[in-house]
Amino acid sequence: MSPGTALVLVDARALARRSGLHPDLVRRLIALDAVDPLDLDAAARLARLARLRHDLGLNVAGAALACDLLERIEELEARR
C-alpha cells in the first residue's frame, strides 16, 4: 500500500464519520471519483450524494451529476 493509498483510507474513515455513511460506501464513491476525499467539502458532498440516491432513486453516476449541477448553480447564485 502506497502512502497516498493509506491517506485515502484514513480520509475515507473520517469522511464516513462526518457524513454519516458507511466507510465501505465512502470508499466506493471515492473509487468511482464521485467525491474527492481531499476536498474540504467532501463530507457535505457525500451526504448530498446519499440523499439524492435515497430520495430520488438515482444511481451513483446520476447523483454525482446532480451534485455537480447543484454546486454549479450555487456558484452562479453566489456571484449575484
Image: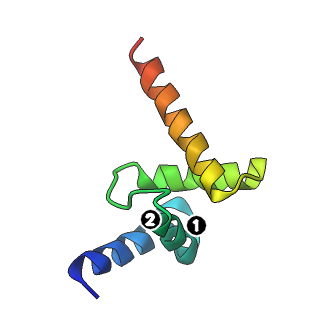
Disc 1 residue type (three-letter): Leu
Instruction: For label 2, count other residues whose C-alpha is less than 10 Å away and answer few (under 14), some (14-19) or many (20+).
Output: many
Q: Report whether 68 appears left or right of 56.
A: left
Q: Which mark is residue 55?
A: none
Residue found at x 60% / y 41%: 66
Residue found at x 68% / y 48%: 52
**Residue 31 percent location from the top left of the image:** 46, 69
- Furthest residue in direction top, as rendered: 80
Residue marked by disc 2: 15
Instruction: For label 1, count other residues whose C-alpha is less than 10 Å away and answer few (under 14), some (14-19) or many (20+).
Output: some
Disc 2 residue type (three-letter): Leu
Is the residue 56 above or below the residue 69 in the image? Answer: below
Tell me, yes or no, if residue 33 can be seen here.
yes
**Residue 71 percent location from the top left of the image:** 49, 35
- Furthest residue in direction left, as rendered: 3
Quarter of the image with the C terminus in it: top left
CB atoms at circles 1 and 2 under 8 Å apart?
Answer: yes
Mark closest to the chain's N terminus, 1 or 2: 2
Is the residue 41 above or below the residue 27 in the image? Answer: above
Q: Which mark is residue 21?
A: 1
**Residue 15 percent location from the top left of the image:** 44, 65
Is the residue 78 above or below the residue 50 in the image? Answer: above
Residue found at x 22% / y 80%: 3
Tell me, yes or no, if residue 17 can be seen here.
no
Look at the numbered disc 1 and give the secondary structure of its residue.
loop
**Quadrant housing residue 38:** bottom left
- For the residues labelled 1 and 2, the Cα–Cα distance comes to 8 Å
- Furthest residue in direction bottom, as rendered: 1
